[in-house]
């Protein structure tokens, strides 16, 4: 698995390259095996979201923690 910046991920996506990477700082892991019109995502580590992303989520901090615990 690669370690990439947000911008490096975006550049690979724009080029439609397949890759598996952790974004610097561990914010998220992205794995693209092929390009299709469907996107699936799961947030397993909501406590590590950047502040500017966290405010976009409707779940409270307690709800995010509860949802994470279900995955253990």
Image (cartoon, grey):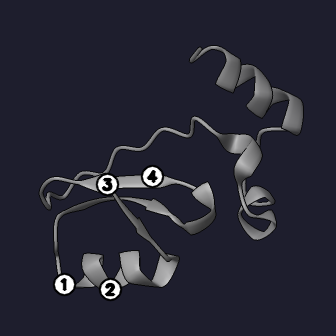
Q: Which residue is mark 3?
A: 1
The answer to whether the residues at label 2 and label 1 have Cβ atoms under 8 Å apart is yes
Q: Within the image, what quadrant is residue 24 found in?
A: bottom right
- Residue 57 coordinates in the image, percent (x, y): 72, 51
Q: Earlier in the sequence, mark 4 or mark 3?
A: 3
Local crowd at mark 4 within 10 Å, few (<14), some, or many (≥20)?
some
- Residue 52 coordinates in the image, percent (x, y): 77, 70
Q: Earlier in the sequence, mark 3 or mark 2?
A: 3
Q: Which residue is mark 4?
A: 29
Question: What residue lies at 63% left-to-right and 63% top-to-bottom?
Answer: 25
Relative to the observer, which residue lies in front, 67 or 28?
Answer: 28
Question: What residue lies at 69% left-to-right and 17% top-to-bottom?
Answer: 69
The answer to whether the residues at label 4 and label 3 have Cβ atoms under 8 Å apart is yes
Q: Is 49 positioned to the left or the right of 41 in the image? A: right
Question: What residue lies at 64% left-to-right and 39% top-to-bottom?
Answer: 45
The answer to whether the residues at label 4 and label 2 have Cβ atoms under 8 Å apart is no
- Give the CA distance from mark 4 to mark 3: 9 Å
- Residue 11's mark? 2
The answer to whether the residues at label 3 and label 2 have Cβ atoms under 8 Å apart is no
- Residue 15's mark? 1
Q: Within the image, what quadrant is residue 12 found in?
A: bottom left
- Residue 3's mark? none
Query: Depth-wise, is mark 4 or mark 1 nearer the camera?
Result: 4
Local crowd at mark 3 within 10 Å, few (<14), some, or many (≥20)?
few
- Give the CA distance from mark 4 to mark 1: 19 Å
The answer to whether the residues at label 3 and label 1 have Cβ atoms under 8 Å apart is no
Q: Is 10 positioned to the left or the right of 52 in the image? A: left
Q: Is residue 15 above or below residue 3?
A: below
Circle 1 — which element? loop
């Amino acid at each position: 698995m690669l370690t990439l910046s947000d911008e490096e991920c975006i550049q690979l996506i724009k080029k439609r390259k397949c890759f598996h990477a952790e974004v610097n700082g561990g914010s998220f892991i992205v794995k693209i095996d092929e390009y299709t019109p469907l996107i699936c995502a799961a947030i397993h580590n909501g406590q590590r979201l950047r502040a500017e992303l966290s405010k976009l989520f409707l779940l409270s901090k307690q709800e995010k923690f509860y949802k994470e615990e279900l995955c253990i």
